[in-house]
Amino acid sequence: MKKKVLIISLIIIIPIIAYISYKAYYLYEYRINSEVIENYDNLINGLNFKETITQNTKDLEEKEYLKFQKIKIKNEFNDFVIDSKGTEYVKYNLYTENNSLSPKASLAIGTETTYMSRLNSEEMQEFYQKHNIKNDLDILKYLSENKTPKRTLLTSINEIKCEYLLREYMALNLPNASNIIEITGDNIGYILIGKNNTTEVVILKDDKRYILSFTNQNYFTEDYIKNTLINNIKIN
């Protein structure tokens, strides 16, 4: 009788121990911290949504725009010269009369695929659906609201892996930021106030990231970008 009870106990206990060990392995293998994920602390510290602004796009005559692909912006950059140009981007620099080597300010315009379209495995799609993530802006909001992921032995393997992959990818690809401003209105997107003296305006449309990057935050001030410049950007 005792032997039978022992066998039954082992039949119950061994799978439990195996399950706990299996989950503990995944929690350790896909642990989330700065020792494992490069640049992770900078990612998390910069994911702070400062405010929300509404884009009210102004219609201008075509000749008033600076254009690149589907991106149009009011041309207030006549003193800028093209520094480099590729199929997906163009960069303009502003030089002073006394310094023709180091630009005073720069503007880069380009397009990229969205973060979601790059992380689009079946498992990631399930993760997005579970957390109501529909675009790149939602990814940033999710990470901002969940800076410390809640993971336990009851968390599914898929959740553990996808949480890790998302945070690792964003840490490696998102510029270090001090604040983020959400854009609503005529378009959705965000303004990323970078720690590297660069501010990015990102418009999300048609599964693309339309990016305008402004270098020199004293020249392109936050106030100017969010109150004036944002309303002079159109995506056709």
Image (cartoon, helix red, strand yellow):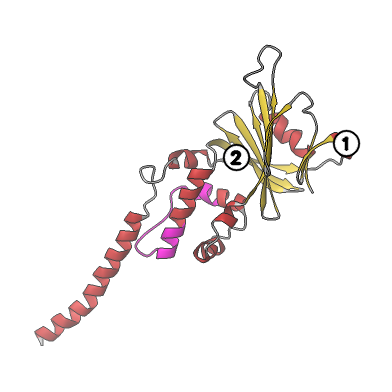
Instruction: Give the image location of residue 130, x and y in percent.
Output: 53, 64
Tell whether position 229 is magenta: no
Q: Nearer the viewer, residue 73 or 10?
A: 73
The residue that disc 1 covers is: 63
Q: Nearer the viewer, residue 209 or 149?
A: 209
Q: Residue at x 57, y 37 (%)?
A: 179
Tell whether position 152 is magenta: yes
User: What kind of element bears circle 1?
Assistant: helix
Q: Nearer the viewer, residue 79 or 116?
A: 79
Q: Which residues are magenta?
A: 142-162
- As drawn, 167 above or below 120: above
Instruction: Give the image location of residue 209, x and y in percent.
Output: 66, 48
Label 1 Cα neighbours within 10 Å, binned few <14 / some 14-19 / many ≥20: few
Instruction: Give the image location of residue 105, x and y in percent.
Output: 66, 25
| Disc marking residue 180 | 2
Query: Looking at the rendering, which quadrant does residue 160 occupy?
Result: bottom left
Callout 2, which amino acid?
Answer: Ile
Q: CA distance from mark 2 to mark 1?
A: 32 Å
Residue 211 visible in this rendered orientation of the protein: no
Label 2 Cα neighbours within 10 Å, binned few <14 / some 14-19 / many ≥20: many
Q: Are marks 2 and 1 in contact (CB under 8 Å)?
A: no
- As drawn, 95 above or below 191: above
Q: Residue at x 39, y 42 (%)?
A: 34
| Disc marking residue 25 | none
**Given the current orientation, which residue lies at the most extreme right position?**
61
User: What kind of element bears circle 2?
Assistant: strand
Instruction: Give the image location of residue 54, x and y in percent.
Output: 74, 43
Q: Nearer the viewer, residue 58 or 185?
A: 58
In the rendered image, which quarter contains the N terminus? bottom left
Give the mark nearer the N terminus: 2 vs 1. 1
